[in-house]
Image: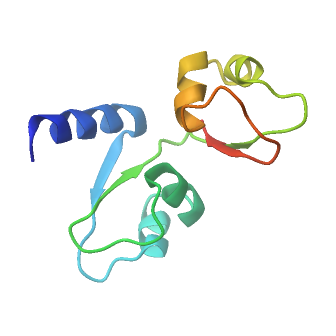
């Protein structure tokens, strides 16, 4: 793994606390159960639909939530609600300045 890959893993570890290496026989469901979370959250955080042996999966800490954008929400109001920065919400929403109703953001 190059330096950029290592830096990415470190940043995600700090953000999510746990990096799980997938072993033979594991599924998203079994990993979610092991860490008392849901497959939906793991898929959203990692932007994946499945796992393979050897994959690194970032597991969100217990304070992580999926927020569904509602009418009148803005990046700023969501940031205030969760006590995070506007830049963090932008990053989690795909880097865009605009949100759409129903959009899911991992906070």
Q: Nearer the viewer, residue 49 or 21?
A: 49
Left or right: 81 as drawn, with respect to 32: right
Q: Nearer the viewer, residue 104 or 81?
A: 104
Q: Residue at x 24, y 74 (%)?
A: 53
Q: Nearer the viewer, residue 63 or 96?
A: 96
Left or right: 50 as drawn, with respect to 73: left
Q: Please state the horizontal and vertical placement of residue 12, each as a whole percent of the image.
A: 34, 38
- According to the image, what is the colour scheme of the structure? rainbow
| Relative height, residue 61 to residue 11 (above, below) | below
Q: Residue at x 77, y 19 (%)?
A: 77
Left or right: 84 as drawn, with respect to 101: left
Q: Please state the horizontal and vertical placement of residue 19, each as a whole percent of the image.
A: 30, 49
Q: Which residue of the protein is positioned furthest toward the right in this rendering?
A: 71
Q: Please state the horizontal and vertical placement of residue 58, each as a whole percent of the image.
A: 37, 50
Location of residue 56 (image quadrant): bottom left
Q: Which residue of the protein is positioned furthest toward the left in this rendering?
A: 2
Location of residue 52 (image quadrant): bottom left
């Amino acid at each position: 793994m190059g330096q950029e890959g290592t830096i990415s893993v470190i940043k995600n570890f700090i953000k999510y606390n746990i990096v799980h290496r997938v072993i033979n026989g594991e599924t998203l469901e079994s990993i979610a159960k092991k860490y008392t979370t849901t497959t939906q959250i793991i898929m959203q955080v990692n932007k994946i639909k499945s796992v393979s042996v050897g994959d690194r999966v970032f597991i969100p800490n217990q304070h992580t939530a999926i927020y569904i954008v509602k009418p009148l929400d803005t990046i700023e109001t969501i940031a205030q609600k969760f006590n995070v920065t506007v830049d963090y919400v932008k990053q989690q929403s795909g880097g865009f300045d605009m949100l759409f109703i129903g959009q899911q953001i991992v906070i």
